[in-house]
Image (cartoon, rainbow, N blue to C red):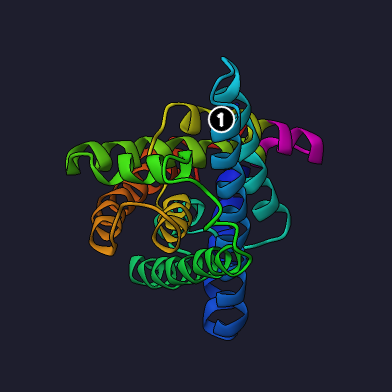
Amino acid sequence: MIDRPLVEKSAASGQRKMSLLERDPARYLMRAVLAGMYLSIVVFVYWALSHNLHGSPFGKVIASAFFGVGLSIIVFTNAELFTSNNMYLAVSSAEGRTTWFQSSVLWTVCYAGNLVGALIVAGLLYGAGTLAELPADHALYVGAAHKVHQGALAIFIKGILANWVVCLAVRLALSMKEDIAKISIMILVVFIFLYLSFEHSIANMGTFSMSLLGNGSIDLRDALYNLVFSTAGNIVGGAVFVGLPFRYLNPEEARPGA
């Protein structure tokens, strides 16, 4: 089956995103902030489920299955997520709809907006006293410490794997016509990276922000260490492992009957 129409749809999406950023940067930034907020509140639920269901053999399964809700919210509200944009802008740049410099600018702005969103949710949870109520051995704090105490290469490779999976989920959703099918495929595929504990930079922003404001043991330098390598891995996973192969396998001249 030729997927050229989906390549064109992805390229057009990347072009629209770039156009919005150039035409109305405040509106674009707000969409990025909202994506960071949506994902971060789901991150908190993930860690709460992981902790509360720790004694159950199905605890990690349930927590990991829930996480896809975050990506579904982002997709259906047209919010702007850095990691999925790694795929979209790679396709649009390979198609000549945007330049690679424009892509890097959009990725930077989107990343900053996602970070602001993560900080807002962490701040709200702190203000509500929710983070202070968590014990020092809570899954959130233990998970944050584990993430920052890995080797740089391991974080980078797990970052590649994480966004490879996330962008595959987005790519498959593009093929679906019904909303329930889109939601189902995103939840099922995103489950993979959570269950296997890969490194998603934007999800990590939420985790680290909450740990820093709560009773976690990590410091800011630890968080930045992880984010540098997980972010680099995410770019490779989304752009090099999904976006560019997707476009290469479906070039402009490859049409049904050609």
Q: Is residue 77 magenta?
A: no
Q: Is residue 180 left or right of residue 140?
A: right
Q: Quadrant of residue 32?
A: bottom right
Q: Is residue 18 left or right of residue 162?
A: right
Q: Quadrant of residue 41?
A: bottom right
Q: Which residue is the extreme one toward the top?
A: 57
Q: Which residues are magenta?
A: 174-184
Decide which of 125, 89 is in the foreground and name it: 125
Say above or below: 175 vs 10. above
Could you tell me what secondary structure mostly forms the magenta stretch? helix
Residue 118: % across, % down: 51, 63
Report the number of discs: 1
Residue 80 visible within the image: no
Crowdedness near tag 1: few (<14), some (14–19) or many (≥20) residues, C-alpha within 10 Å: many
Say above or below: 10 vs 59. below
Residue 16: % across, % down: 60, 68
Q: Quadrant of residue 65?
A: top right
Q: Amino acid at mark 1?
A: Phe
Residue 257: % across, % down: 61, 29
Say above or below: 57 vs 94. above
Residue 184: % across, % down: 72, 32
In the rendered view of the protein, which quadrant contains the N terminus? Answer: top right
* Residue drawn 43% across the image and 65% down it: 111
Which residue is the site of mark 1? Answer: 191
* Residue drawn 49% across the image and 27% down it: 195
